Amino acid sequence: MDVQKITEDIFKPSYDRFSVVNIANSILKHFGCETSHSEYPFDDLKPGLFERADKVILFLIDALGLESLKIILQREPLFEQQNILTATSVFPTTTSASIASLLTASEPIEHGILGYTLYLRELGALVNMIELSSPTLGKVPSTVQSRDLLFTRTIFERLVDVGVKGYVLTSKNIRGSGFSNLVHVGASIKSYQSFGDLFFKLNEILEQEGRLFAFVYWGLLDSIGHKIGVNSPAFQSELYWLLKMIQKEVLSNLQENVLLLVMGDHGQIYTPWEKEIWWSWKDEVSSFFLVPPGGEMRMMHIYTREPQKVVKYIQEMYHDQILALTKEQSIQLRLFGDSQASKKSLDRIGDVILIAKSNYSFYFKFTGREESLKSKHGGLSLEELMIPIVVFRR
């Protein structure tokens, strides 16, 4: 697959056929649901992959990028090459936006989860979209309805309409978190405490009768990448043994009517501390800000009344480190999706979008708890954008 280049090291998600959105629409189509986007070309690349598959398991490994998988396969060819397909994440390349796209089969511009932190005008506060909390408000008030935060139905809600059971298998530590409660609506939720417990619970799900879709989430790899580095032995060892466990515990027990998809939501890129840009209210750039920036450490939503001045300032002061776009330019480039943007989504997008070039990253000191991370994601490098899909049928 080809991805469209914006600059020398910044690329666009392939929303037309090859993104996580299209993968989710393939699952909906297989089970007889209406789709709102084109399907991923599984039939062209792996003819007959979905035939007689009553059960579809999507095993998502947070931060499994294509480059990381290639490194592991050089060490040991765990899977046949013809079973490894490629796709892109969404923008921003972050867990909240990507998983929301997978579990709603919609683009970020449609579902409204447009970053890790967003300024929600209706609350007048910057909100962490994973925890659904704000440094100024605390937890998002219970009076705020789920549909005010996530604008589309989940894949589980749509599947239950056609008689397909939905399951989520996730870590006990994040079950019931704010974001999970949004994107897991309609599913039967199970949690695990360890590697072994995960595979035991997954086998229990596979023993259920009838058609089903199960979403399995493993998040520890992402944490290791942030803390120790995506290129570290610890990251590679974690990924290697996770894939070995999948090979041993799942593939050996796979029934003929089960399709297993193992994939990532985004990759990570190594970001050295000497290429970190730290801002605070004391820096000149902050004079343009209405509120603290939202987004990630590799992309930012800048909320301002003077977008053109911000773009000009960034171009002059950070030309080699940051690509600055107005909201209108980001929509024109279809970074957040090909669909028509609703006013609710537009309100969440920054008046200026900043995207890190090369392996630069940026921080805004707001809560005082910000910390330097070894590897990051959120931007549009190939390392962050490209993800594998490993497919398995008996």
Image: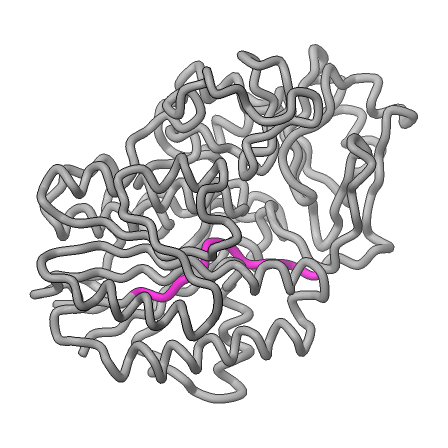
Along the line of sight, which residue is nearer the eye, 12 or 128? 128
Quadrant for the C terminus in the image: bottom left
- The residue lying at 59 percent from left, 79 percent from top is 237
Horizontally, is 158 left or right of 224 in the view? left
Residue 263 forms part of the magenta stretch:
yes
Residue 325 seen by the camera: no
Position of the N terminus, as image quadrant, is bottom left
Residue 347: percent from left, percent from top: 52, 17
Segment colored magenta: 261-270
Question: Outermost residue, bottom direction?
Answer: 76
| Any part of residue 139 in sight | yes
Above or below residue 119? Residue 79 is below
Depicted 299 relative to depicted 261: above or below? above
- Residue ID at (42%, 75%): 196
The type of colouring in the image is: one colour
Q: From the top left corner, tell me how far across and down residue 348 is, in percent.
A: 54, 22
Closest to the observer, 385 or 5: 385
Residue 214 placement: quadrant: bottom left
Taking the image as shown, residue 230 lies to the left or right of residue 29, namely: right
| 278 up-or-down from 39: above or below | above
Instruction: Give x and y (percent) for residue 307.
Output: 69, 17
Of residues 200 and 270, the one nearer the viewer is 200
Question: Please, what is the dominant secondary structure of the magenta stretch?
Answer: strand
User: Which one is nearer the viewer's eye here, 330 or 217?
Assistant: 217
At 57% across and 23% down in the image, what residue appears?
327
Q: Residue furthest right?
A: 282
Residue 339 lies in the magenta stretch: no
Residue 249, how many percent across, how many down? 34, 80
